[in-house]
Image (spheres, coloured by chain):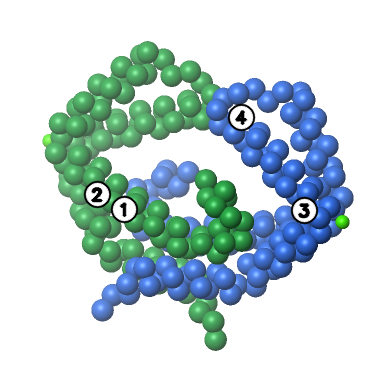
Chain colours: A blue, B green
Amino acid sequence: MATNMYDAAYALQKAITENPDFQALKQQYQIVQADPQAKQLFDQFRGIQMELQNKMMQGQEITEMDNMKAQQIVMQVQQDPKITALMQAEQRVNMLIGDLNKIILQPLEDLYGPFMQS
Amino acid sequence: MATNMYDAAYALQKAITENPDFQALKQQYQIVQADPQAKQLFDQFRGIQMELQNKMMQGQEITEMDNMKAQQIVMQVQQDPKITALMQAEQRVNMLIGDLNKIILQPLEDLYGPFMQS
Ligand SMILES: [Ca+2]
Ligand SMILES: [Ca+2]
C-alpha cells in the first residue's frame, strides 16, 4: 500500500525536530531568551524588521528615519554574539527548510514547470 | 536510529505524487493542455495573473485597462468547464500543500510562536 501522505508529513516533522541544525537553533533561541538584554535587543530587531516588511508590502514609503532606526539596531545586533549565533542558526534552518520544500514540491514543478517556483 | 530527514522528505514527495487529489490535478492539467483553445485561454489567464502580481509586488499602479483585461479573461475562463475543473483541482492541491506545510513547520511554530506563520 502507498505511504499515507499525512503519516509521511508527521515523520518529516519528527525528523526536523531531531535534526542537529534545528536542535542548535532551539538552543540558541533559548540562550537569547535567557539573557534579558539580548532578548530585548532581539525583540526590537524583529519588531523593526516586521514593521519595514509591512510597510513595503502595503506600498508605503520607507523613510530616512526608518532607515536610521534599522541601521542602529542592526549595528547593536551585530555586536551581540548570542544574537549573531541565533541568526546563523536560523539561516541554516531556513536553508534546510528550503531544501525540503524543493523536494516536496517537485511533483508540482514537474507538472507546471520551473516558473511556478517563485 | 532517527529517520533521515531527506528520506522522510522523499517519502512525502512520493506520497504526494500518489495522492488522488494530485493525480486529479495532473489529469485536469493534461485535459487542458490537449485542447488548443482551452490551453490558449488558460495561458492568457496565467499571464495576466502573473503580470498583475508583478505590478503589485513592485508597487506599480493597476490601471483601469489592466482591470478590464483581467475581468474579460476571467469571464471567458469561468465559461470553460475544462479550465474551471483544473482550477478546482489546483485549489484542492493548494489546500493539501497548506495542510502539509502546517505539519512540517510545526516545530518552528512551537519555537517562535504563531506570529511567524505569515
Ligand atoms: Ca548580554
Ligand atoms: Ca474547447
Give the amino acid type for the residue marked by disc 3 in the picture.
Answer: Lys
Return the residue nearer the eye: B18 or A111.
B18
Q: Residue at the spot x=21%, y=55% of the render?
A: B24
Location of mark 2 (residue): B89
> In the structure shown, which secondary structural element does the residue marked by tag 3 occupy?
helix
- Vertical relation: B110 (above or below) A48: below
Give the amino acid type for the residue marked by disc 4 in the picture.
Answer: Lys
Q: Is residue A49 left or right of residue B68?
A: right
Mark 4 or 2: the one toward you: 4
Q: Which mark is residue B85?
A: none
Location of mark 3 (residue): A39
Mark 2 or 3: the one toward you: 3
The quadrant in which residue A70 appears is top right
Give the amino acid type for the residue marked by disc 1 in the picture.
Answer: Val
Q: Are the residues at dot 2 and dot 1 in contact (C-beta closer than 8 Å)?
A: yes
Q: Please state the horizontal and vertical placement of residue B40, each as a whole percent of the image.
A: 23, 33
Label 3 vs label 1: CA separation?
Answer: 40 Å
- Vertical relation: A23 (above or below) A86: below
Q: Please state the horizontal and vertical placement of residue A61, each as a whole percent of the image.
A: 64, 22
Is label 3 on the same chain as label 1? Answer: no
**On what subunit does the disc labeled 4 rest?**
A
> In the structure shown, which secondary structural element does the residue marked by tag 4 occupy?
helix
Q: Residues within 10 Å of mark 3 (few under 14, many from 20)?
A: some
Label 2 vs label 1: CA separation?
Answer: 6 Å
Q: Quadrant of the N terminus of chain A?
A: bottom left
**On what subunit does the disc labeled 1 rest?**
B
Q: Which mark is residue B93?
A: 1
Return the residue nearer the eye: A35 or B15.
A35
Location of mark 4 (residue): A55
Is label 2 on the same chain as label 1? Answer: yes
Label 1 vs label 4: CA separation?
Answer: 31 Å
Task: Kindly tell me whether residue A103 is visible in this rendering.
Answer: no
